[in-house]
Image (cartoon, helix red, strand yellow):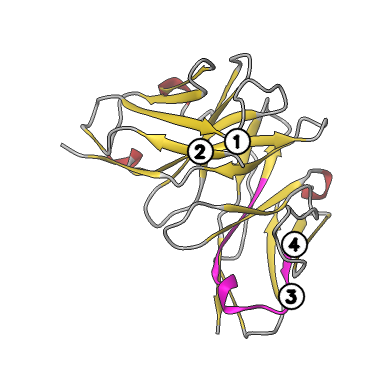
Amino acid sequence: SYVLTQPPSVSVAPGKTARITCGGNNIGGQSVHWYQQKPGQAPVLVIYYDSDRPSGIPERFSGSNSGNTATLTISRVEAGDEADYYCQVWDSSSDHHYVFGTGTKVTVL
Amino acid sequence: QVQMQESGPGLVKPSETLSLTCTVSGGSISRRSYHWGWIRQPPGKGLEWIGSINYSGSTYYNPSLKSRVTISVDTSKNQFSLKLTSVTAADTAVFYCARLNSDDSGDFFFDYWGQGTLVTVSS
C-alpha cells in the first residue's frame, strides 16, 4: 500500500514560517489534503486538492505538491497553530482507499 | 452546517464486536456527492482510515481490517454504522466518523468530522 512519510516534529518561532513535508512515491501525481489536529480535538481540514483552503482557514495556510514531496506552509506562525498535522491521499492504485501520513507535531517556540 | 456525532459503548471485551453509530445532522446522508467514513486513532498515535460507504451502500475497506469490518447506512435515520469483530487491545482507539467530499474527480477528502469517541478493549 501507499506510504506517506512526514517528519515527526517541526519547531518554529512565532511570526516565522513553518514548512511540513509529506513524502510519497510520485505524490505530485496525486491530490494531497492536509488536516490540523489540536490535543483532544478532532482533525480539521486546512488544505484540500494540494492548495485549496476551506472557508474559515486563514490565508497563512498554503500548500504545494510536486515530484515526491507535498508541502504545507504556515506563514506568520501563531501560538494557536501548535498542533499535529497530517497529510492524506486517495490511494489511486486501490478502489476508494485512503492513506494518512505519519503526522508532524508543530511546536511554536 | 453539517454535524456528526458518534455513539456506542466505550468499553468492549476482547474477542467481542465493537459497534458504533454516526448520526448526521444538517444534511442528508443520501446525497450522491458524499461518502461517509470511519477513521481511528490509537492513543498517542496517528490516523488510520477504516472504511467508507456511499449513498447507495457500496463499501470500501482498509485491506488490513477488511476481514473484520462492516459499515452500513440507514438513510431513514440519517445514520451510518461500524462493526469491528474479534477485537483485541490493539483496537483501543478514538474512533471518528467523517464525511468525504469530492469534486468530480472521485478523489475524496474528509471535510466534516465527529468529535470522536474513545473505545477501550479490555476485560
Label disc, if present, on residue A71 of the rendered structure? 4
**Closer mark to the observer between disc 2 and disc 1:** 2
**Labels 3, 2: front one:** 2
Badge nearest the viewer, 3 or 1 = 1
Q: Mark 3 points at which residue?
A: A75
Q: Do labels 2 and 1 share a chain?
A: yes
| Residue highlighted by disc 1 | B99
**Left or right for A66, reference A10:** right
In this rendering, the answer to whether B85 lies above or below B121 is above
Question: Which quarter of the rendered picture does the C terminus of chain A lie within?
Answer: bottom right
Q: Which amino acid does label 1 sit on?
A: Arg
Q: In the picture shown, does residue A87 fall above or below B102?
A: below
Dividing the picture into quarters, in which one does residue A22 lie?
A: bottom right
Marks 3 and 2 sit apart, C-alpha to C-alpha, by 31 Å
Task: Measure how far apart labels 3 and 4 are at the Cα level.
Answer: 13 Å
Chain on which label 3 sits: A
Circle 3 — which element? loop
Name the N-terminal-most of marks 2 and 1.
2
* Badge 4: residue crowd in 10 Å (few <14, some 14–19, many ≥20): many
